[in-house]
Amino acid sequence: MKAVCWMGTSDVQTMTVDDPKILNPHDAILKITRTAICGSDLHLYDGFIPTMESGDILGHEFMGLVEEVGKDVTNLRRGDRVVVPFTIACGNCIFCKKKIWSACDNTNPNAHLMEAAYGYSGSGLFGYSHMMGGYAGGQAQYVRVPFANVGPLKIESDLPDEKVLFLSDIFPTGYMAAENAQIEEGDTVAVWGCGPVGIFAIASAFMLGAARVIAIDRLPERLEMARNFGAITVDYSEEDVDVLTAIKDLTGGMGPDSCIDAVGLEAHSTELQGFYDKVKTAVMLETDRPSVLRQAIQAVRKGGTLSIPGVYGGLLDKVPFGAAFGKGITMKMGQTNMHNYMKPLLERVEKGQIDPSSIISHRITLDEVPEMYKVWRDKRDNVTKIVIDPWAERAA
Amino acid sequence: MDRALSEKPTAEKVPQSGAAGVVLNGHYLPPPADKDGKQWVRTSALILKPVSDLYELWRDVEKASLWQEQIVEVRATGPKTSHWVMLTGDDPDKSIEWDSEVLNDEPGKRIAWNSIGGDSDNAGEVIFETAPGGRGTVVTVLQEFHMSKLASAWETLTGRNPKQAIIENLRHFKALAETGEIPRTQGQPHGPRGTSGKTKKSLYGETIATPPGGQRIAS
Ligand SMILES: NC(=O)c1ccc[n+]([C@@H]2O[C@H](COP(=O)([O-])OP(=O)(O)OC[C@H]3O[C@@H](n4cnc5c(N)ncnc54)[C@H](O)[C@@H]3O)[C@@H](O)[C@H]2O)c1
Ligand SMILES: [Zn+2]
Ligand SMILES: [Zn+2]
């Protein structure tokens, strides 16, 4: 089959590799019908997440048709159409029972690597480094899905793939971000980053009762998207705009009830601190660039909540913990507990309450993926979300 | 020692001694220190299965090859004795063998064993206890071994330090007990690994074969 392989930092290639096969009793093999590139993939592309090996198949946002199931998979049959959550969960351990699915104990074959780095290991993820399991991902024509009895969501309606594909990650991720923000009716919420995760966080904040959402980014096409979803936008790159002042101005000086960092460890910064973080990460004294995190801690109101769906991987420098303590804020974060949200969000899509496909800007073939990683990284060509048809041939 | 606070409606009685020497007189004790060529490892896991099921799975020595790394065969040679064969690398012809005897068998509670000759010098115990709050079973393993052929085979040929191997084996045991399988990636497709990819694989312990787990159980 064809698959997108990580061959080193800033080097992905579409290659021909073996087809996946069933390896465990709860496995299924999917023929992938649609897959996508995520902001999280950039952290791999840019070399921020350790324990990648050359030859790793990327991709964790995919859906498809069940091709084959292992002997203990009883809920799926050949031909079923499913969306697969990017976190792999067993359904039986204490964390799965508590519905903290992304903390599953039994799905990471390399748990010892994550234990060494984080104290305990989280669940395995598709196509997201060996520390997170080393599972082959879904920017490919076929994929092996472990614990297929637990994760995949069957799509029984005739909704097109594009409307349900994002149930595999970014829609639930945006929704959990809003849930983690502990929004009460009438709240004001500020969201950093108007990428797919930020956009779904904006939409979800409104669904959960926000009266006003302030969205921060610098890319005009993304700010426009945020306005389409109902937010007031702030362009942090505009001359004379100071984000903290803007947020105060828009909240009567009080600050937002909740802040959501939907940017993560590769935040872009125009200020001196951005340069400081670049130097520090270059010499490995710091692994992440937390300029949005710093700003959000500063911006949130006293006793407010900071929700962090943006990914952080390692060590952060100069995080204003005193401000967090001084204001008595709550912080909630983590990989999305996908399995809690897929079904209820599918219902919202089925009812026509939201059209997730509205964020798609590019539809491409597998052969175009390597060049599109560059476009996605550099945010060129008004890119907002890239969806791949793994069976389409490149137009000549 | 219990008297400073009288209101603790859900507190459980503090154990005076605990599994594998974790607690003594209500106080935590670290695992025994390595000394004179003898190494110790203590590890525990919370497993959502009844004590009795876990005891039985562990006591069924012939099933150990399903969940212990590099163990290709275990044969019961008597009610308390067994013969163990362990691979020492990729070559199926290269193995070490030893016999083992159960010294103490308290059904539903504890199993203690000792090697009795062959290529390995090890002893250990496993304790099954109901977790605090009744939330599953805590399984604690305490194992000691001399750096014998067994320990060095683990280390040099699998790239796994023998202490880590015991920790991994308990992890596999838990996964098998809770889910009926052991998570694996060996055998999945990938692009060319190149030299750096190959080095990383062994560095990350991925060259050690994942035990079969549920692959074999029902087939
Ligand atoms: N928690 C999870 O389970 C989970 C799941 C998916 C994605 N994520 C993470 O969410 C984050 C966003 O993902 P995405 O797909 O939307 O990525 P993306 O790269 O498309 O979007 C990031 C956006 O942040 C903006 N940005 C950069 N610096 C900024 C700054 N200083 N202030 C305001 N905006 C800034 C960029 O312009 C861009 O629009 C990533 O870190 C990704 O890894 C987390
Ligand atoms: Zn993603
Ligand atoms: Zn689990």
Image (tube, coloured by chain):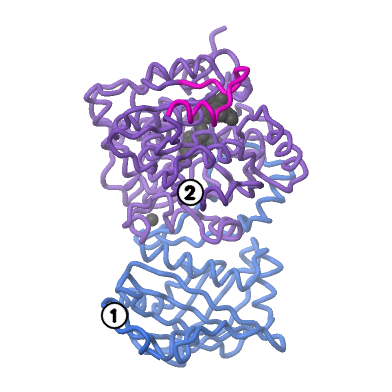
Across and down, in percent, residue B34 comes to 67, 83
Q: Nearer the viewer, residue B20 or B120?
A: B20
User: Label 2: chain?
Assistant: A
Across and down, in percent, residue A179 comes to 35, 41
Picture disc at residue B7: 1
Asked which secondary structure carries label 1, the reply is: loop
CA gap between label 2 and label 1 equals: 32 Å
Q: Residues within 10 Å of mark 1 (few under 14, many from 20)?
A: few
Asked which secondary structure carries label 2, the reply is: helix
Picture disc at residue A327: 2
Quadrant of the picture in which ligand 3 is shown:
bottom left
Q: Residue at x 73, y 45 (%)?
A: B196
The answer to if A142 sits in the magenta stretch is no
Q: Is residue A249 above or below residue B35?
A: above
Q: In the figure, is residue B184 to the left or right of B177?
A: right
Which amino acid is tagged 2? Lys
Q: Residue at x 58, y 18 (%)?
A: A368
Which amino acid is tagged 1? Glu
User: Label 1: chain?
Assistant: B
Q: Residue at x 68, y 79 (%)?
A: B149
Q: Residue at x 60, y 33 (%)?
A: A267
Give a yes or no on whether discs 2 and 1 share a subunit: no
